[in-house]
Amino acid sequence: MKSIASLLSAAALGAVVLLSPTVAHAAVNYVALGDSYASGVGTRTYISSSGSCQRSVKAYPYLDAARLGANLTFVACSGARVADVTANQLSAVTSAANRITVQVGGNDAGFSSVITECAKPAWLGDCTTAINNATATINNTIPARLNGLYAAIKSRASSARVIVVGYPRLFNGTDCNAGTFFSPDEMTRLNATADLLNSKIAAAAGAAGFAFVNPTTAFIGHSVCGNPEWINGLSNPVSESYHPNVTGQAQYANLVAPTLK
């Protein structure tokens, strides 16, 4: 006759076998937070119900959710700053979320206004001051904002896998667009500012225990005026400018996908 201990052991093994398929096929509930880079501005195709947030089915959260067969809650919104994510998007993060991406910080640094200023002829714009102001904000203000947001995400979904997504460099060293006047030095400094922002985002993500996806290397040679170009140059409408195009979003999806599995 089998001992009670051996019977209990067999029962426990059976329970593991029965439970394993359930665990393996647990639903993936994915929440996508962030700004225009996360919403898909630049792809020129938007979900009508998203209004001014300009969410696109070509954006990386949508593409990766389809790959995973995930339930997607897509709340990224064009123009969002850290405070906007906290006020308007964070409520989408619940304990049911087990995958979260967040991409925000570029608008806090004022990148749109910096690019606008630096695109002007030297005699008309003040690119140096614009970049210096952005750098000061990145160094002195943005880290605390990110720390607060990441802590709030963790408090709402403590067991979720959270992936923080960074920004690419915008320039390859050539300005091929009519109507813009970026000098080589300005493009170099703008790229360095993007690198600085990524470094602060990565540090805050690491402190929170979140993964960080840095697109910098993948986008080298494919920024504005690249071949092929993954980031729009000056466009019509202007809101499409300096954002990843359809190919750029697909590349973002390739970079983010492994961290979501």
Image (cartoon, rainbow, N blue to C red):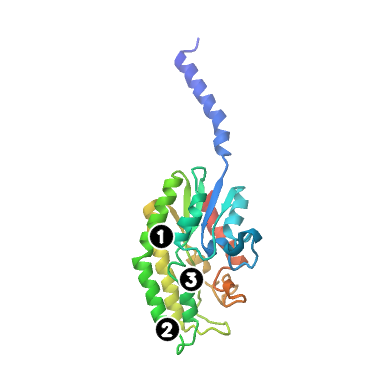
Sequence-earlier tag: 3 or 2 = 2
Q: Nearer the viewer, mark 3 or mark 2?
A: 2
Query: Residue 202, which numbered label?
Result: 1
Q: Nearer the viewer, mark 2 or mark 1?
A: 2
53 displayed left or right of 184 = right
Q: Residues within 10 Å of mark 2 (few under 14, many from 20)?
A: some
Q: Amino acid at mark 1?
A: Ala
Q: Are marks 3 and 2 in contact (CB under 8 Å)?
A: no
Label 1 residue SS: helix
The CA span between labels 2 and 1 is: 29 Å
Q: Residue at x 54, y 25 (%)?
A: 14
Q: Residue at x 55, y 54 (%)?
A: 257
Q: Is residue 102 above or below residue 230?
A: above
Label 3 residue SS: loop
Residue position for label 3:
169
139 displayed left or right of 17 = left
Q: Residues within 10 Å of mark 1 (few under 14, many from 20)?
A: many
Residue 201 at x, y = what percent?
A: 41, 61
Residue position for label 2:
126
Q: Amino acid at mark 2?
A: Asp
Q: Amino acid at mark 3?
A: Arg
Q: Residue at x 49, y 84 (%)?
A: 120
Label 2 residue SS: loop
The CA span between labels 3 and 2 is: 20 Å
Sequence-earlier tag: 1 or 3 = 3
Rendered image quadrant of residue 60: bottom right
Q: Are marks 1 and 3 in contact (CB under 8 Å)?
A: no
Sequence-earlier tag: 2 or 1 = 2
The CA span between labels 1 and 3 is: 15 Å
Residue 51 at x, y = what percent?
A: 61, 62
